[in-house]
Image (cartoon, rainbow, N blue to C red):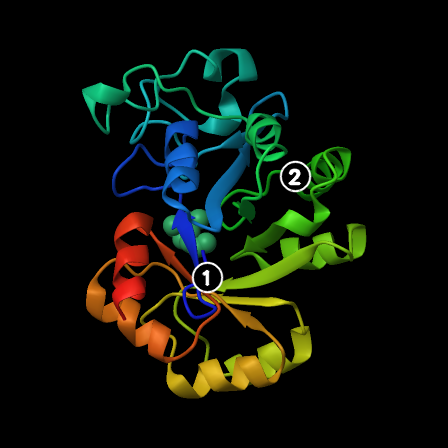
């Protein structure tokens, strides 16, 4: 769906209408015609790549404690749907592999956030890169992180895979950082993105993909700035707004 060249990425799937970071949310994003999904990856105690937002299981699942302290086998027993709504009872926590198994049969773009900003997850970059290559999804993924050292690691491991710098708030020297790093994507929070920074980043060749715009005024403001992607918890609503714009 081409909305004046702005793509819609469903943040954590379709987080506003479905349990975040679950296959139900990703399938909803596909159903309503979003071009991309955004999701977050952590490692289990036995090194499996697990798709969940928080470091802990408490907020969104039936289990408690840290993802990093839980085995893959135990994580498979989690219910990641009921806390959102009874309608989604039994919806499992997806493993990265399961998303790729689904994605190989469609055209969905995937913004994979490497969640190394709070916990280190030794070797996570290599594991993600290996799986992307195994599935030959190099041209369908964008790897992003608030931890720019993770992005540097990906750059060394897999220069062919698109990378993006994530920011929450922008440092004073953002222009210096953007011009020095020369990654493909710039992912600022929506409130920090000004006309000036957007223009600067675009001039350097960055794809600008702000997160997360859910209300009409934010969506229109970003569209008027001609960003490349709008990440939203409500992709269906965002598409309707942009179609009418
Ligand atoms: O990747 C953009 C956005 O998802 C970053 O924030 O906390 O939702 O992972 P968060
Ligand atoms: Ca994220």
Q: Which residue is mark 1?
A: 2
Q: Secondary structure at mark 2?
A: helix
Q: Position of residue 16 (x, y in %)?
A: 26, 43
Q: Earlier in the sequence, mark 1 or mark 2?
A: 1
Q: Position of residue 43 (x, y in %)?
A: 57, 31
Q: Are marks 1 and 2 in contact (CB under 8 Å)?
A: no
| Tag in front: 1 or 2 | 1
* Above or below 179: residue 148: above
Q: Secondary structure at mark 1?
A: loop
Q: Quadrant of residue 181?
A: bottom right
- Residue visible at 43% across and 29% down in the picture: 23
Q: Position of residue 182 (x, y in %)?
A: 67, 74
Is residue 230 visible in this depiction of the protein?
yes
Q: Position of residue 99 (x, y in %)?
A: 55, 31
- Residue visible at 69% across and 42% down in the picture: 137
Q: Which residue is mark 2?
A: 124
Is residue 21 visible in this depiction of the protein?
no
Pick the residue in front: 122 or 214. 214
Q: Is residue 129 left or right of residue 206?
A: right
- Residue visible at 42% across and 33% down in the picture: 27
**Disc assigned to residue 159:** none
Q: Is residue 220 left or right of residue 103?
A: left
């Amino acid at each position: 769906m081409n909305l004046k060249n702005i793509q819609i990425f469903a943040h954590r799937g379709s987080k506003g209408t479905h349990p975040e970071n679950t296959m139900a949310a990703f399938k909803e994003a596909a159903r309503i015609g979003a071009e991309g999904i955004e999701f977050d990856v952590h490692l289990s105690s036995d090194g499996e790549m697990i798709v969940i937002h928080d470091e802990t299981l408490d907020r969104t699942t039936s289990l408690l404690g840290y993802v990093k302290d839980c085995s893959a086998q135990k994580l498979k027993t989690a219910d990641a749907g009921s806390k959102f709504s009874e309608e989604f009872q039994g919806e499992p926590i997806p493993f990265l592999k399961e998303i790729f198994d689904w994605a190989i049969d469609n055209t969905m773009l995937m913004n994979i956030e490497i969640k190394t900003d709070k916990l280190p997850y030794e070797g996570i970059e290599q594991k993600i890169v290996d799986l992307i290559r195994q599935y030959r999804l190099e041209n369908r993924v964008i790897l992003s992180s608030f931890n720019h050292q993770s992005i540097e690691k990906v750059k060394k491991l897999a220069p062919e895979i698109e990378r993006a710098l994530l920011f929450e708030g922008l440092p004073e020297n953002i222009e210096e950082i953007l011009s020095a790093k020369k990654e493909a994507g710039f992912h600022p929070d929506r409130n920090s993105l000004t006309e000036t920074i957007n223009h600067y980043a675009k001039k350097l060749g960055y794809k600008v993909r702000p997160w997360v715009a859910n209300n009409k005024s934010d969506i229109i403001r970003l569209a008027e700035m001609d960003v490349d992607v709008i990440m939203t918890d409500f992709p269906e609503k965002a598409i309707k707004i942009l179609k009418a714009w």
